[in-house]
Image (cartoon, helix red, strand yellow):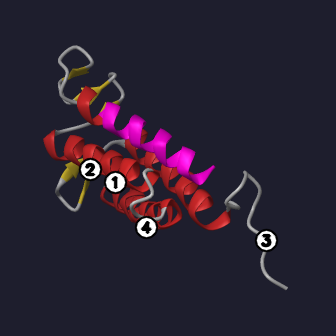
């Protein structure tokens, strides 16, 4: 199941990364008129998607991908809320981005740390 989520994350992030460069879908730096994007932000989405696809293929553990991805996106979320309109002066963000990053981080952390390998319930701790 975690491997399936890696495929989904990968496809979605690759798609979002590509759409960030498509005129009409992205106008005046706004993807779908809601999310701030720029060239570096799009590249981050493409790299995130590629990493997820690699994890889904099993070249690296999908669980490890979600653990690392969740932590990194959690940091990006906090920095985005604190700094307001950018993350470390590198990528532009707005409130919609920050909320989406929070949801993505929470989902990735749950998948990486809380989900059992075979399904959607939390991992049980050994006795």
Which of these two is toward me, 47 or 91? Answer: 47
Residue ID for mark 3:
124
Query: Is disc 1 placed on a helix, strand or loop?
Result: helix
Residue 51's tag is 1
Residue 65's tag is none
Give the magenta range: 1-16
- How would you rate the neighbour count of disc 3 (Cα within 10 Å): few for under 14, some for 14-19, many for 20 or more? few
Q: Residue furthest left?
A: 39
- How would you rate the neighbour count of disc 4 (Cα within 10 Å): few for under 14, some for 14-19, many for 20 or more? some
Could you tell me which residue is drawn at 39 percent across and 60 percent down? 59
Residue 47's tag is 2
Circle nearer the N terminus (2, 3): 2
* Callout 2–callout 1 Cβ contact below 8 Å: yes
Q: Residue 115 at x, y = what percent? A: 68, 60
* Callout 2–callout 3 Cβ contact below 8 Å: no
Query: Is disc 4 placed on a helix, strand or loop?
Result: helix
- How would you rate the neighbour count of disc 1 (Cα within 10 Å): few for under 14, some for 14-19, many for 20 or more? many
Q: Does the segment drawn in magenta span residue 7? A: yes
Could you tell me which residue is drawn at 16 percent across and 47 percent down? 40
Q: Main secondary structure of the magenta part?
A: helix
Q: Quadrant of residue 34?
A: top left
Q: Quadrant of residue 81?
A: bottom left
Residue ID for mark 4:
68
- Disc 4/disc 1 C-alpha distance (Å): 11 Å
- Disc 2/disc 1 C-alpha distance (Å): 6 Å
């Amino acid at each position: 199941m975690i491997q399936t989520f890696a495929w989904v994350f990968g496809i979605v992030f690759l798609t979002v990364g590509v759409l960030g460069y498509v005129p009409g879908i992205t106008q005046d730096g706004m993807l779908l008129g809601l999310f701030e994007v720029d060239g570096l932000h799009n590249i981050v989405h493409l790299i995130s998607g590629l990493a997820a696809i690699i994890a889904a293929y099993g070249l690296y553990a999908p669980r490890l991908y979600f653990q690392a991805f969740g932590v990194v996106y959690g940091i990006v979320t906090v920095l985005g809320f604190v700094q307001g309109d950018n993350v470390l002066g590198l990528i532009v963000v707005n409130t919609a981005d920050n909320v989406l990053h929070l949801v993505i981080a929470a989902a990735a952390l749950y998948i990486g740390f809380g989900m059992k390998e075979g399904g959607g319930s939390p991992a049980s701790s050994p006795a």
